[in-house]
Image (cartoon, helix red, strand yellow):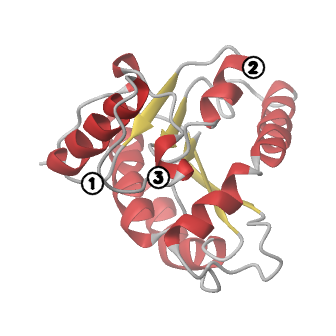
Amino acid sequence: MAIPFPAQGHINPMMHFCFKLARDHGFVVTFVVTQYHHPLLVRNLAPVFLEQGLDIRIVEIPDKRGTGTTTGASSILELGHSFFSLLPEFEELFQSLVIAHSTSDPITHPPPSLIVYDFYFPFLLELGTKFSLPCIAFYAGSAGALASIMAVNQGHRSGNNPPFPTSSFLAHTSHRSKHFVCYVVQ
C-alpha cells in the first residue's frame, strides 16, 4: 500500500517508484489518494497500467475538507493538518483491503504486506504497528532538504529550539533511520 501526500510533487515520484516496483519486480500495488486526485489518476494512468499488464490499483480516501478537493487549503500546512485526522479512515480502508484479499485468490489478490507512506505522514506508522506490517517512509524531496528537516527535528528533540518557529506538523515526527530507504531512479 502506497500513501503519498496529496500534492503533485509527492504523488508523481511515489507513483513512479510504485510503477517500477510493479513493472520490474511484479509487485501488486494499492495506491491511496484523495477524492480530488483519484479521477485524475484513474483517467490518465489506468490505461497505461492495463496496457503494460501492471497490477496497480488506485483507491480513494476522503480528504475531510468537505469539498473533495485540496485546492481550498490556505496553506500546505493546513492541508497536512487536515490529514492527521484521517487515521481512522486509513484503518478502515486497510481493513477492507485485508478482508477483500482474504476472500479472494491470494495469488491474484495478495494481502497487503508493506506500507510505503509519505515522509509527511508519520502517523501512518501506527497503522503499520497495528497490523504488524513494515513501514517505509518515502521522501520525494532533495537529500539536502531531508538533511535540514532531520537536523531541525534532532535539535527539537534535544531541547535546542531552532531560531525560527516550527509547525507542529513538521516537528511531529516519529521517523527513525531504520524507516528510510534510499532509492534513485535511473
Secondary element type, mark 1: loop
Tell me the residue at 55%/44% (across/down).
121
Mark identifier at residue 122: none
Q: CA distance from mark 1 to mark 3?
A: 29 Å
Tag shown at residue 141: 1
Q: Are marks 2 and 1 in contact (CB under 8 Å)?
A: no
Please name the residue that numbered disc 2 is placed on.
Answer: 130
Q: Earlier in the sequence, mark 1 or mark 3?
A: 3
At a point 59% along the width and 39% down the height, the residue shown is 1
Report helix, strand or loop for mark 2: helix
**From where the camera sits, is residue 111 visible?**
no
Q: Is residue 26 above or below residue 75?
A: above
Q: Position of residue 59 (x, y in %)?
A: 69, 57
- Which residue is more in the foreground, 132 or 144? 144
Give the mark, 2 or 1, whose residue is nearer the N terminus.
Answer: 2
Above or below residue 102? Residue 142 is below
Q: Quadrant of residue 133?
A: top right
Identify the secondary structure beneath mark 3. loop
Separation (CA) of disc 3 from disc 2: 32 Å
Query: Which amino acid does the dot numbered 1 rest on?
Result: Gly
| Mark 3 residue type | Gly
On screen, residue 108 versus residue 97, left or right, reads left
Query: Which class describes the residues within 10 Å of circle 2: few (<14), some (14-19), or many (20+)?
Result: few
